[in-house]
Image (spheres, rainbow, N blue to C red):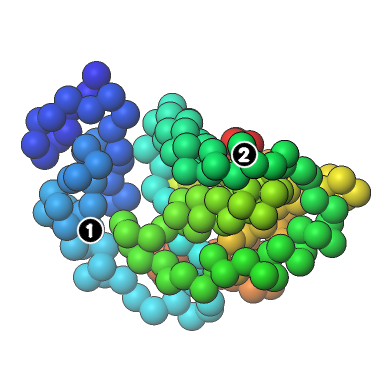
Amino acid sequence: MSKCEHCGRDVLFPFGCCYCQRAFCSEHVPSTKHECSHALGHWHNKRKATERELPSPRRLVSPITAFCTILILSIIITTNTSCYLDRRELTNPTYQEALRFIESDQTDKNVYREAKYTCANFAEDFKSNALEAGYKCGYVLVFFPDLSHALNCFNTTDCGLTFIEPQEDAIVTVTIGQPYWDRTKYASNYFGDPFNDTVINFLIDW
């Protein structure tokens, strides 16, 4: 059992701050809730990137914490969609069915907001919508050397595992040992800072 470093409350699965990497309860993990000096320094020093910015990942506290987080999210998603699971049997889509669903899904219309609506929320909502449509959909947590990022996948019946970036409705490639973001579209920086997006591992929760 850990303790929140702000209020001292016992926390079974602590959350890590994106900036100072200290552990907090869910109430105090936003940087504004624990007066994070690292966050203030980050935004004061933020400079405009010369190329298109990367879709925003999340800071990685530890693989154990990330794994526990995805298990909790899985329970929440499963609970919220139980009514659909009771009514129908989920199926794996064909590649074309997956493309049609991605085009019709409106998750990409949401706006990224730091500590309020992040890549994890995009992936949660996309999966929930896919389950509602009757498709089996994976929640994917990709690990980089210093960060993690959430996206989705389908195990299509004709083309196999297909990864989706729900923030952009894009088909993406996840290969261990290779950069995640397409260098023809994105700079190798995050808010102007050097960023290593080499995939070191990934987890899929179905």
Label disc, if present, on residue 39 of the rendered structure: 1
Q: Earlier in the sequence, mark 1 or mark 2?
A: 1
How far apart in space, not on screen, are marks 1 and 2 (Cα)?
Answer: 41 Å
Report x, y in % for residue 71: 48, 31
- Residue lying at 58% horizontally and 56% vertically, measured from the top left: 129
Give SS at disc 1: helix
Q: Quadrant of the C terminus?
A: top right
Q: Residue flagged by tag 2: what amino acid is it?
A: Leu
Label drawn at residue 16: none
Q: In the displayed structure, would residue 186 be above or below residue 58?
A: below
Where does the image place residue 103, in percent across and percent down from the top left?
69, 70
In the picture, the quarter occupied by the N terminus is: top left
Considering depth in this image, is 92 or 54 the residue closer to the camera?
92
**Nearer the observer, 44 or 4:** 4
Determine whether, in the image, residue 72 is placed left or right of residue 137. Answer: left
Q: Position of residue 187 (x, y in %)?
A: 56, 70
Where is mark 2, residue-wise?
A: 85
Classed neighbour count for the residue bearing mark 2: other residues with Cα under 10 Å, few (<14), some (14–19), many (≥20): some
Identify the residue shown where x is 77% and y is 43%.
91
When asked about the image quadrant of residue 106, the answer is bottom right
Q: Return the residue nearer the eye: 166 or 149.
A: 166
User: Which residue is found at the position 81% from the left and 59% from the top?
Assistant: 97
* Residue 195 seen in the figure: no
In screen coordinates, is 64 left or right of 151? Answer: left
- The nearer-to-camera label among 1 and 2 is 2
- Determine whether 155 is above or below 179 in the image: above
* Residue type marked 1: Ala
User: Which element is circle 2 on?
Assistant: helix
